[in-house]
Amino acid sequence: QVQLVESGGGLVQPGGSLRLSCAASGSISRLNAMGWYRQAPGKERELVARITSDGRTNYVDSVKGRFTISRDNAKNTVYLQMNSLKPDDTAVYYCNAVGSDSAYRYLEVWGQGTLVTVSS
């Protein structure tokens, strides 16, 4: 069984910064893509940022230039550095990983979510 454990959410003032972390553990063979999604109250879940195992990234337009996704493949960990936060960034942030488990079966796992609140 593979699990994702997130950390780093909290309350921050507009213009502030937060760093989210997500560590994968369990019977993992390979993690191809890791990413962060978010869901604000009354809205659908959306992809925020995604990074492949070879470091290619993509971002939703609303966070480009403010958020940076990175990963440590040796630690099976993905990070999201969020700068210049806005109230519209308030949401529950979910980590996602896609790859294969130790039996080389397709794997997609979600974290439990971490709340980010941007408010003065």
Image: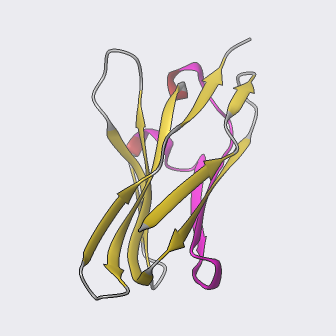
- Please report the residue visible at 48 percent of the width from the left and 61 percent of the height from the top: 3
Picture mark count = 0
Examine the structure image and report whether residue 74 is included in the region drawn in magenta. Answer: yes
Q: For residue 46, what is the image quadrant?
A: top left
- The quadrant holding residue 115 is top right
Residue at the front extreme, as displayed? 1
In this picture, residue 27 sits left or right of residue 85:
left
Residue 57: give x, y in percent of width and height: 44, 68
Residue at 31% x, 22% y: name it: 43
* Left or right side of 70 for 19: right
Tell me how the rendering is colored: secondary structure
**Residue in front for this viewpoint, 28 or 114:** 28
| Left or right: residue 111 compared with residue 71 | left
Residue 32 x/y as whole percent: 37, 78
Q: Residue visible at 44% across and 80% down?
A: 28
Image height of 34 relative to 84, above or below: below
Q: Quadrant of the C terminus?
A: top right
Task: Name the spot of residue 20 as percent of width and height, x first.
Answer: 65, 49
Give whichever of 74, 107 is nearer the camera. 107
What quarter of the picture does the N terminus occupy?
Answer: bottom left
Q: Which of 66 and 4 is in front in this view?
A: 4
Q: In which quarter of the image is residue 108?
A: bottom left
Asked if residue 24 is among those painted magenta in the image, a careful observer would answer no
Span of residues in magenta: 62-87
Residue 95 image point, x, y percent = 47, 52
Say above or below: 60 vs 74.
above
Query: In the image as oriented, which residue stretches furthest toward the left?
Result: 106
Q: In this view, does 65 lie to the left or right of 108?
A: right
